[in-house]
Amino acid sequence: MQSILAKFMKDSVVRGHLLRLLYERRREGSIPFGHAEQAVAPPGGISGRDWLRAVAQLSEYRLIDWTPLEDQSGMGLLSGFAKINDFGVKVFEAGVEPPIRISIEKSRRTKVPRQQQAPIAPSTPQQQMITEAVEKIIIAINQADVSEQEKNEAKSLLQKLLGSKAAASVLGADAQSLAAKYFTR
């Protein structure tokens, strides 16, 4: 039965399991994955390949911080350390819209009282100003008197910018929130 489940388990469910694990173990810091010593094995019903793909996807969409280890075997084995970041915590605790589909069972989602939630670095006034300015640019592009193709090209560039490490360092979690709000549907 489990092998049948494993074949049909959606990526979004695997990402949900992984995000939950990292959320529940967030006080431990970075946790080993892949072929690292004492690496976290995937839960029953999830293949090691799908588990590591979920790590890569959550890292790519900046819901977790990933520190890869160099493969000493020469076989191209993936390993490293992962931990949930502020944006991942917001997605898990506060239900912030993630930029990639993640299925977390509602009955198992932890609803943490406000005063017990993990501290999330608030946006600085400068980050808020930049976020508002980018939002105004997106709205202006949508209302511009140009072709849909030109609008889409401009929005594609903004989406790429918001997904960059530079935008993440300047805007923090606001970069992912803007990208999720305007560019994922």
Image: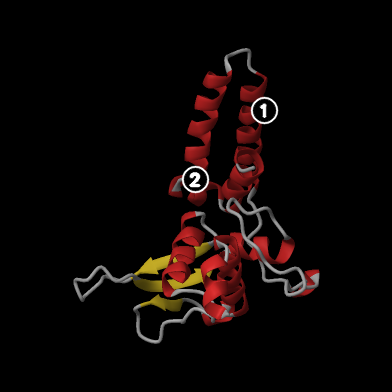
**Which numbered disc covers residue 173?**
none
> In the rendered image of this protein, does residue 108 appear above or below residue 10?
below
Furthest toward the bottom, the residue is 38
Q: Residue at x 44, y 49 (%)?
A: 165
Q: In this view, does 105 lie above or below 148?
A: below
Give the mark nearest the N terminus, 2 or 1.
1
Where disc 2 sits, the SS reads: loop
Residue 76: image quadrant is bottom left
Question: Residue reaching furthest left?
Answer: 74
Crowding around mark 1 (Cα neighbors within 10 Å: few <14, some 14 to 19, many 20+) is: few
Image x and y of residue 155, in percent: 55, 30
The amino acid type, in three-letter code, at marker 2 is: Gly
Q: In this view, does 88 lie to the left or right of 30?
A: right
The residue indicated by pointer 1 is 139
Q: In this view, does 34 lie to the left or right of 139?
A: left
How far separated are the C-alphas under marks 2 and 1?
Answer: 18 Å
> Which of 14 and 2 lies nearest the eye of the viewer?
2
Residue positioned 67% across, 71% down in the render: 118
In the image, farthest residue toward the top:
145
Q: Which residue is drawn at 67% across and 67% down?
A: 104
Asked whether the beta carbons under mark 2 and mark 1 sit within 8 Å of each other, the answer is: no
* Residue type, label 1: Ile
Q: How many labels does the image show?
A: 2
Quadrant position of residue 164: top left
Q: Residues within 10 Å of mark 2 (few under 14, many from 20)?
A: some
Question: Label 2 belongs to which residue?
Answer: 163
**Residue at horizontal 62%, vertical 60%?**
102
Q: In which quadrant of the rendered view does residue 135 lie?
A: top right
Residue 134 image offset from top left, x and y in percent: 60, 34
Which image quarter is the N terminus in?
A: bottom right
